[in-house]
Image (spheres, grey):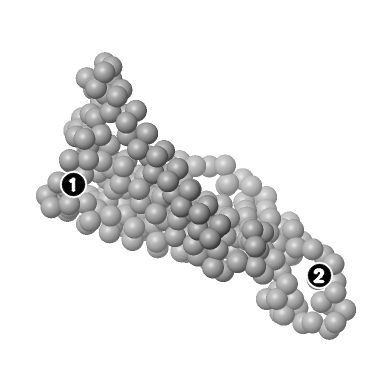
Amino acid sequence: MKKLSEKAEKTVYAILAIATFFLIWAFITTFTTAGESTPGPIEVLKLLFSSIFEPIGKYTIYGHLYFSLRRVIVGYTVASMLGIVVGISMGTSRYAEAIIKPLFELIRPIPPIAWIPLVILWFGVGELPKYAIIFIGSFTNVTLNAYTGAQRVDPQLIGCAKMLGTSNRDIFLRVILPSSLPQIFAGLQVALSTAWMAVLAAEMVGAQEGCGWIILRGSDTTNIPLVLVGMVVIGVVGLLLATIMRVIERGLCSWNRMDG
């Protein structure tokens, strides 16, 4: 009952925070000069709801969401699988760390948007460059957290497992991987948010649909309500994706929770 009460309280606070944000937005656009250039929340929400039935470009808002989510899922999934392998390899092998880490540290600070010219040169302007940009945005976060998680495994646990005659395969599967899992999930969650934010950069590469394209279309046509519709959709879907990831993490890492 106590946990349910705490969850209900957090939900109420979250709703109040969002409502306060919209009230402040409405107040600023109604009673200040900002309203001359920035639409209020009512106008933006009306356009958002109308886009459910009336297309923006070729598709309704659901069609744009489908294309953006598909791009994110593909790029994020590939980046997560490769990032976990590379990160754990660096964290468990000094040879892999010596070879891979300098290259990783060289690439890690470069933002996804900086890769756009090279990605277009390498892959053209189809779907592949969009996947590549989202991949780049996700890969570094997953790799870094997998590496950190593998490095933080208690050496005494590994030593005890070896003394008991445990094979290297079982040490990895039963000691290293479970101990790294909370840190890996932290990286997966950050990477998912980064991948969703990278949609805008990805859809600069010759896209004719998607949530990022909606923002670019609004910017090109000086349609500020359309820009804000794209921003609202990206924000809401990003929140939902982060919530889903936290639920998955609680299910798979319930043993790691300290709240009983």
Q: Element at badge 2?
A: helix
Toward which corner of the image does residue 131 lie, by quadrant?
bottom left
Question: Which residue is denoted by mark 1 in the rendering?
Answer: 49
Give the residue at the far right of this rendering.
163
Q: Residue at x 27, y 51 (%)?
A: 210
Q: Are marks 2 and 1 in contact (CB under 8 Å)?
A: no
Residue 182, how many percent across, how many down? Answer: 63, 61
Furthest toward the top, the residue is: 33
Question: Which of pointers 2 and 1 indicates the residue nearer the eye?
Answer: 1
The one nearer the camera, 187 or 42, is: 42
Q: Vertically, is 52 above or below 170?
A: above
Q: Quadrant of residue 167?
A: bottom right
In the image, residue 219 lies at what x, y percent?
Answer: 25, 33
For mark 1, does the 10 Å Cα neighbourhood hold few (<14), some (14 to 19), or many (20 or more) residues?
Answer: few
Q: Which residue is rendered at x = 50% and y = 54% of the image?
A: 5
Instruction: State the CA–CA distance, disc 2 to disc 1.
Output: 55 Å
Q: Residue placed at 32% from the left, 34% from the top?
A: 22
Q: Is residue 180 visible?
A: yes
| Residue underneath mark 2 | 157
- Residue at left 71%, top 79%? 169
* Most distant residue in the front direction: 1
Judging depth in this view, the residue of 45 and 179 nearest the camera is 45
Q: Earlier in the sequence, mark 2 or mark 1?
A: 1
Image coords of residue 212 (percent x, y)? 31, 45
Q: Position of residue 244 (x, y in %)?
A: 44, 60
Can residue 135 be spotted in the picture?
no
**How many residues crowd mark 2 within 10 Å: few (<14), some (14–19), many (20+)?**
some
Disc number for residue 215: none
In the displayed structure, does residue 143 sit left or right of residue 150? left
Of residues 128 and 212, the one drawn nearer to the viewer in this rendering: 212
Q: What type is the residue that disc 1 sits on? A: Phe
**Relative to 172, does residue 79 appear above or below in the rendering?**
above
